[in-house]
Image (tube, helix red, strand yellow):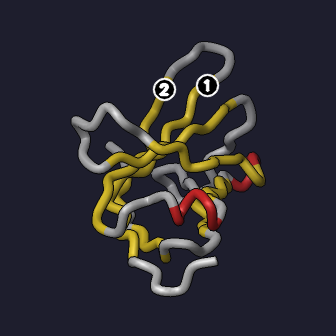
Amino acid sequence: MATIANLQIDQGSDFTTTINLDNLDGTNFDLTGYTVKSQLAKTYASSTKTTITANITNASAGEITLTMSNSATSALAAGRFVYDVEITQTSGGAKTRVIEGQITVHPQVTST
């Protein structure tokens, strides 16, 4: 079962967060041989989804970085969204949802 982690995004700002995956025994989950993908949507049933750029930044340490540019966060409506992060094993194609939760987008006042 995926770990639940709720996130906050300031609309119109660059967003970056780092996730570290661990095995059940507390050691780093080695992401060598995996790819990662992340999306957000207004609800789980929404047909419209927005990509969150997800990169494995340190495979042996189980480190994933999620980012969105300020132009991407500006395009989001203020409010609550749901998101998840999935990893895919490149050799066998097995997919695992590792993180899920809510994202709250806080509205901006100042725009460019």
76 w.r.t. 109: above or below = above
Q: Residue furthest top?
A: 92
- For the point 62% across and 61% down, the residue is 71
Mark 2 Cα-neighbour bin, 10 Å: few <14, some 14–19, many ≥20? some
Residue 51 x, y percent position in the rendering: 53, 43
- Which picture quadrant has residue 8? bottom left
Residue 52, labelled with which disc? none
Check disc 2 and report its element: helix, strand or loop: strand
Residue named by callout 2:
95
- Which picture quadrant has residue 22? bottom right
Cα distance in 3D space between marks 1 and 2 = 7 Å
Mark 1 Cα-neighbour bin, 10 Å: few <14, some 14–19, many ≥20? some
> Is residue 59 or residue 82 the one in the foreground?
82
Q: Quadrant of the C terminus?
A: bottom right
Check disc 1 and report its element: helix, strand or loop: strand
Q: Is residue 28 left or right of residue 4?
A: right
